């Protein structure tokens, strides 16, 4: 940990979540989380170690579990990512990381389960950027199953707007182009690739409320409309067109070295050591309303742990793993 890293280097909203900790502990956790944000792109393995350190100190804080899930995903440990995402969802009550859950299910070789998870919520209640990311992940799961036409349909959502570019548009356009290529529609795919490039360029040239695309000054909307991320740039208009209840008792004894390292020392905060948890313990806690959030929010099933024994990125069928871009 570099000495110059201070708690203030972590964004304020995240620091507020740490207020339940002692000041000394909160400061150390904040420093570790700040390091994660600085390292996640250039050194995800080191970022993951910082996330583990933060989790050992603050395993009951939502943002800490979310961060650990993201670093696990980035290092290819999809089974651990799933477990942490379930915990984050239970603690926070949020569905904003649902796309990552879907893609992690793909990562452990369960595209069918990925589709079930993606259908477990009302998408209309999700922010636009989350809806777009979920569509990309669901499309990838369809591709895993060889359902190319269905993969294209997953992406044909209102956010697939060829006339305007939002923060999520380049990735959505690229994913759409990828599926078109798989369908042999190379001309259409090239058009959407061009749209993605124009959107990426427009979003990167924002100066106050104006962007320049193809030497035209186009409006840039930075308002928060309908609770969505609506920062968007107009793209050249002429451009071409959870889990069933039986999962609870499937396997609740989740003794796992990686999780122990992550300081997951109990289930639902009831002081049950991971290695000591039994099926009866989980059922009892669930019946008392302690666990909450449904079976999918409990510790991982046996399939998760079995998947965790495979090499990162390796599917159950031996195929290489794709990411949320559907490639």
Image (cartoon, grey):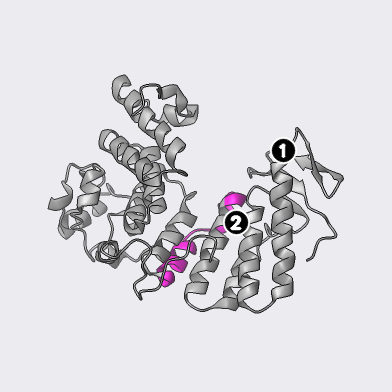
Q: Is 119 contained in the magenta span? A: yes
Q: Which residue is drawn at 41% across and 48% down?
A: 70
Q: Can residue 91 be seen in this view?
A: no
Q: In this view, does 32 lie to the left or right of 148?
A: left
- Main secondary structure of the magenta stretch: helix
Where is mark 1, residue-wise?
222
Closest to the observer: 294 or 315?
A: 315
Q: Is 218 contained in the magenta span? A: no
Q: Looking at this view, name the residue that lies furthest to the left.
A: 276
Where is mark 2, residue-wise?
132
**327 shown above or below 68:** below
**269 shown above or below 22:** below
Residue 290 position in % (x across, y down)? 27, 47
Q: Which residue is drawn at 17% across and 41% down?
A: 271
**146 shown above or below 282:** below
Q: Quadrant of the N terminus?
A: top left
Q: Is residue 140 left or right of residue 316?
A: right
Residue bounds of the magenta highlight: 111-129
């Amino acid at each position: 940990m570099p000495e110059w890293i201070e708690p203030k280097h972590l964004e304020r909203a995240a620091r507020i979540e740490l207020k339940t900790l002692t000041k000394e502990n909160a400061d150390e956790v904040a420093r570790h989380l700040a390091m994660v944000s600085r390292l996640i792109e250039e050194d995800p393995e080191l970022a993951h170690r910082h996330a583990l350190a933060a989790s050992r100190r603050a395993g009951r804080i939502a943002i800490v579990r979310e961060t650990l899930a993201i670093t696990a995903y980035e290092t290819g440990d999809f089974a651990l990512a799933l477990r942490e995402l379930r915990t984050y969802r239970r603690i926070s009550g949020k569905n904003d990381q649902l796309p990552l859950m879907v893609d992690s299910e793909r990562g452990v070789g369960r595209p069918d389960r990925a589709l079930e998870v993606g259908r477990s919520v009302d998408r209309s209640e999700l922010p636009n950027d989350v809806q777009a990311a979920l569509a990309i992940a669901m499309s990838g799961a369809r591709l895993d199953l060889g359902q190319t036409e269905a993969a294209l349909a997953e992406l044909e959502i209102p956010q697939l707007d060829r006339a305007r570019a939002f923060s999520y548009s380049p990735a959505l356009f690229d994913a759409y182009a990828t599926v078109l290529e798989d369908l042999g529609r190379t001309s259409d795919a090239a058009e959407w690739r061009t749209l993605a490039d124009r959107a990426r360029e427009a979003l990167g040239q924002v100066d106050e409320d104006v962007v320049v695309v193809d030497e035209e000054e186009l409006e840039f909307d930075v308002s928060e409309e309908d609770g969505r991320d609506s920062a968007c740039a107009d793209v050249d208009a002429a451009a071409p067109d959870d889990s069933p209840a039986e999962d609870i008792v499937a396997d609740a004894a989740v003794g796992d070295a990686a999780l122990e390292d992550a300081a997951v020392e109990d289930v639902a905060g009831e002081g049950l050591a991971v290695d000591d948890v039994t099926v009866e313990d989980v059922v009892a806690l669930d019946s008392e309303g302690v666990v909450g959030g449904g079976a999918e929010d409990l510790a991982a099933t046996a399939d998760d742990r079995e998947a965790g024994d495979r090499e990162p990125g390796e599917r159950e069928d031996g195929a290489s793993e794709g990411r949320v871009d559907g490639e």
